[in-house]
Amino acid sequence: MKIRTRLTLWYATILIVSLILMGVGTYQQIAEQMRHDHRQHLWEHALNETSEMVFQVGLPAIVLGLLGGWWITRRALAPVTRLTEAVEKIHDRNLREPLPRTGNGDELDRLTEVFNAMTARLDGSFQRIREFTLHASHELKTPLTVMRGELETALREENFTPVQRERLLSQIDEIERLAKIVDALTLLTRADAGQITLNLETIHLDELLRESFADAKILAQPQNIQVNLTACEPVCISGDRHRLRQLLLNLTDNAIKHNRPAGTVTVSLCRNNGTAELKIVNTGPGLAPELQPRVFERFFRGDSSHSSAVDGCGLGLSIAQWIVAAHHGTIRFASEPGKETAVTVRLPVE
Amino acid sequence: MRVLVVEDEKKTASFIRKALQADGFAVDVCDRGDDALAAAAATPFDGIVLDIMLPGRDGLSVLRQLREGKNHTPVLLLSARGEVNERVEGLNAGADDYLPKPFAVAELVARVRALGRRGAESKVPVLRVGDLTLDTILHRAERGGQFFDLTAREFRLLEFLMRSAGRTCGRMSIIEKVWDYDFDPGTNLVDVYIKRLREKIDGGFEPKLLHTVRGAGYVLAAR
């Protein structure tokens, strides 16, 4: 129940009770007066007089009072309504804009002031996250750049034995891997802070899928894995081309890497109830049911014994999940250990 | 060719200078953004290697200032921030190329060399490296009288390598130019494609044309 309705009801109750009290009081007074005057038809007359008073004066006064009360509460509560509307429009990117204040120093003005101070503090925290990611990436990559550059310079300028060379080259590979992890982490942290904007355009998802399917077939050949495209219905969605390509490559590559030798990967894209449904099924070892909810966690690896055999930084599915969420879609992971694993992505159709 | 390197990190500036000098460039080094503007105004450079995070004035602002002043010296941007849209932002501000840190030195040198050729890039329809011929109009590749069956992607990869014949092509440049990805795919996509391409164009032929530059990328050359 709205505050306004509640206040009006209380107000009405109070008025009616006072009216009854007034009626009772008036009746007693009139009766007293009549007894004093020794007049006949005592009770009847007093009752008539009272009801006349109550209905002709009291009731109109109640109606007027109620209308006035309703109007006053409405006026008093209008700033709250405006405040609610303003607060509803707040999100992480416009925290810096303060809510408009009336400046009359009342309780609501004070509330607005406190609220503005709170959003300013929040904005400060967001700002610090933003700066942190910016600096973290820079601070981590600068030494990596120096390490890599100096190793390469040494390799070029000095004479090493083949064994020494191999050792240095392997270090360069590790530096590259570390740089990829830093990149992926920065991307995810920035995504968490809502700092990445998508370049939305109309995307023919089926075309993107065909393209990454061609890449997937070639990626799968060294492991002798069969990649099939069983359905590819024409679907248009509103999305960011680069991020969607990243998603497709990410998921198909994952399905190839976590597969048994000579296994299969089956990809399909269908239109289903206003969504584009992308399904990628593989014959990998799968995941135990208790581990499945954790599959999108950062650095999660299903089977520790496989971690060295499968390269990648353990952030691929987290990034995939972010891309899907940023496109207002859903991603689901379902696995029957030893049989098949399916990743289903649903994206809203344009 | 004379190149200005604007980089505030001493060690990075030092190995970039060494590598460029080893490749025959004359190199000036500058460690502040505002100094870089003055240097670029005073000397006509053939190329500028510009870091984005700089004291004094950041790289993007230096770049915008240069372009506003009608200075069209080719610029290669370097960045350690690794933001998704930074490359687009840099190119929009007037950069000719963008390289994220950490990079392979050989790739940096190759890109600086390519800066000097901007605009004059050969658009000849038939490319030749050794006895390998690629006809971009008839869409076919041939070596020693044998025609190769190439997928569209393999064809674009071969064309890119042949257009930069003799220069090291880093994985990042290949990903950008052949796949048009603005992200690191985090897979061995490039290596798998190179391996297939190598089997086709070098299998049973001598001399080998497609070479791996470990830690840097690939180069197509008749050595």
Image: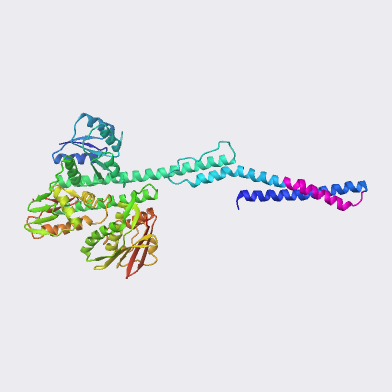
Image coloring type: rainbow
Quadrant of image for the C terminus of chain A: bottom left
In the picture as drawn, the residue positioned furthest to the right comes out as: A38
Which region of the structure is painted magenta? A39-61
Does the rendering let one see residue B54? no
Q: Check if residue A58 falls in the magenta segment.
A: yes
Q: Position of residue A54 (x, y in %)?
A: 78, 48
B74 displayed left or right of A280? left
Q: Where, by quadrant of the figure, is residue A81 drawn? A: top right
Question: From the viewer's perspective, is residue B10 above or below residue B133?
Answer: above
A44 displayed left or right of A326? right
Question: From the viewer's perspective, is residue B95 above or below residue A13?
Answer: above
B110 displayed left or right of A31? left
Q: Position of residue A267 (x, y in %)?
A: 30, 64
Q: Where, by quadrant of the figure, is residue B121 drawn? A: top left
Q: Main secondary structure of the magenta part?
A: helix
Does the rendering let one see residue A276? yes
Residue in front for this viewpoint, A71 or B106 = A71
Residue in front for this viewpoint, B173 or B109 = B173
Number of marks present in the image shown: 0
